Image (cartoon, helix red, strand yellow):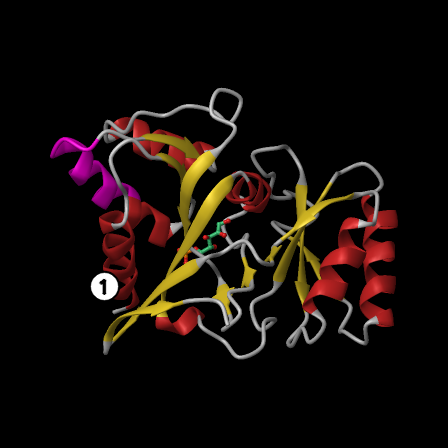
Amino acid sequence: MSDQFKRQAAERAADDVQHGMRLGIGTGSTAEFFVHALAQRVRDGLDVIGVPTSERTHQLATGLGIRLTTLDDEPELDLTVDGADELNSELSLIKGGGGALLREKIVASASRQMIVIADGSKMVKTLGRFPLPIEVVSFGLEATRLAIGKVLAELQLPQKLELRGGAGDPFLTDGGHYILDAHLKEITEVQALADRLVAIPGVVDHGLFIQLATKAYVADQDGVKTVLPI
Ligand code: 5RP
């Protein structure tokens, strides 16, 4: 069922793409529905150029005949379309479930607009039920973990941090970094947490996307809803 909703949200976003646009192309199962819908429009004659947010998306988009470039050649984009793990009514997001949060944030930040596509289960009142991905460098992992724990304690958040993939075979991002997933339950001070985390030297970035999304298409049994930030 959720696949059907993901597809509906993705197809709605593909309808918003206009001729000549420079696009950021997200990562994950919902973003993949978007890539397929976009590829159909390209086959029908739409001319766009895309910057993928992961190697996975790069492969899929190339295979489907979507013209790709890099942020070095196109540092300013018109629109990014991407999924999310959670979104709230302000269109603050948790992203990074697929491990692509850093490239996703760089690409979204380089875009004039960002459309989030999601099934209804991703919409929450308070962010935090989905574990917050924190991308960290491997050097000094334990020191970074300790520093993150202190920030969480100061903000009265649970300090449960899990190295994605486990110590024996840690997951590596496209940038060659590790991910610590923080099980926070409810993030009440989203901006404060975001600011404190990026101030830790071993933290590369985190999955909180604040004031980046300009619109969301959220699909459920009642159809596709347009959500604008309140
Ligand atoms: C990848 C992401 C994805 O957008 C997020 O995990 C949602 O994935 P899906 O569409 O498969 O539910 O942030 O880093």
Residue at point 26%, 48% (across, down): 14
| Placement of 48 over or under 209, stated as above or below | above
Q: Is residue 159 magenta?
A: no
Point 81% across, 76% down: residue:
156
Front position in the image: 150 or 115? 115
| Residue 212 in the figure: left or right of residue 193 | left
Q: Position of residue 54 (x, y in %)?
A: 47, 36
Label 1 beta carbon less than 8 Å to ligand 1: no
Can residue 25 be seen by looking at this rendering?
A: no
Q: Nearer the viewer, residue 124 or 228?
A: 228
Left or right? Give the position of 59 relative to 37. right
Element assignment for label 1: helix
Rendering quadrant holding ligand 1 = bottom left
Report the magenta residues as a range.
Answer: 35-46
Residue type at numbered disc 1:
Gln
Does 133 sit left or right of 57 as displayed?
A: right
Name the side, left or right, on which 49 lies relative to 137. Answer: left
Residue 78 appears in the figure: yes
Which residue is drawn at the image coordinates 61% and 39% (left, top)? 172
Q: State the image coordinates of residue 65 (x, y, percent, origin top left).
A: 24, 27
The residue lying toward the viewer, choosing from 164 and 24, is 24
The N terminus: image quadrant: bottom left
Residue at the limit of the structure toward the left, as seen here: 44
- Residue drawn at x 60%, y 49% is 165
Where is mark 1, residue-wise?
Answer: 4
Q: Main secondary structure of the magenta part?
A: helix
On the image, the x and y values in percent for residue 221 come to 24, 77
Q: In this picture, is 30 found above or below 87?
A: above
Percent x, y of residue 77: 45, 35
* Residue farthest to the top, as pictured: 73
